[in-house]
Amino acid sequence: MSQYGFYFSADRCVTCKACVIACKDKNDLKPGRKFRKVYTNGIGSWSGPDENGTYTPSKVFSYSLSISCNHCADPACQKNCPANAIGKRADGIVFIDRDLCIGCGNCSSACPYDAPSFDKDAMKMEKCDFCRDLLGVSETPACVAACLMQALEYGPLDRLGILHPEAVQQVAPLADPAQTNPSLLITPHKKYEVSSSGALFNMPEEIQAYEK
């Protein structure tokens, strides 16, 4: 069975966060907890001020990334769970077994995408499970269904790769995909420079990332 994954288009995203809200509603998450997050990143630099007090931008632009658990092919969370509470289905979906979870937080510390979230009431770790209950009845994951701009897609990763041959696994500030081989494909912002192999190049040092 093919590995399931997400696709995201940075060009289409308008940072409305409908995906975040839909995910919170679907999973009944309290304030402060998110399984899907939207990050906004600024790239470029400013020179100046000149004699008139004016600053000049150089290749300055911003873009957003909608990121949840990436259901990695080699999940660090699973390898670092002492209770063996994290499983991976035949379709690649990574999930936490609440009955086995001891709430230690090792999965959160190991995950380069900050996906696992601690439920203080239940003293358990939780995260995106790809809306596996919806998939089971042939429905679309809540985040994908809520995206007004169709910036999010889901499905077998090999099929997503065929549909979006320009997509890559990494744009700043995401971790090196070699760490976990995330099941995520991203079409970068049109001003974002990538090589033909998908590796980053000529990235300004003045990259700033913050959660919106």
Image: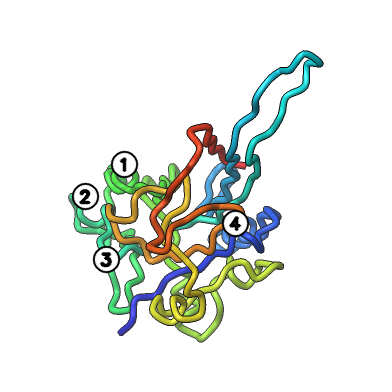
Going by the picture, which residue comes out furthest to the right? 52
Give neighbour class at mark 4: few <14, some 14-19, many 20+ (Cα, 10 Å): some
In this rendering, which labeled residue sits more in front, label 4 or label 1?
Answer: 4
| Residue at (77% x, 13% y) in the render | 51
**Distance between the Cα atoms at labels 2 and 1?**
9 Å
Comes first in the chain, label 4 or label 1: 1
Image height of 96 relative to 140, above or below: above
Q: Disc number at residue 109?
A: 1
Could you tell me how far apart the alpha carbons at marks 3 and 1 are, in whole angstroms?
Answer: 17 Å
Of the residues tagged 4 and 3, which is closer to the observer?
4
Residue occupying the point 27% across, 48% down: 102
- The residue at which mark 4 appears reads as 189
Question: Circle 3 is placed at which residue position?
Answer: 87
Mark 1 secondary-structure assignment = helix
Amino acid beneath label 3:
Gly
Q: Earlier in the sequence, mark 3 or mark 1?
A: 3
Label 2 residue SS: loop
* Neighbourhood count class around disc 3 (C-alpha, 10 Å): few under 14, some 14–19, many 20 upward: some
Which is nearer the eye, 150 or 122? Answer: 150
Q: How are the residues colored?
A: rainbow
For marks 2 and 1 on the same chain, the one whose residue lies earlier in the sequence: 2
Q: Label 2 is placed on what type of residue?
A: Asn
Q: Amino acid at mark 1?
A: Ser
Q: Is residue 50 above or below residue 73?
A: above
Q: Earlier in the sequence, mark 4 or mark 3?
A: 3
Residue that appears at 45% across and 82% down? 136
Residue 80, label in figure: 2
Q: Nearer the viewer, mark 2 or mark 4?
A: 4
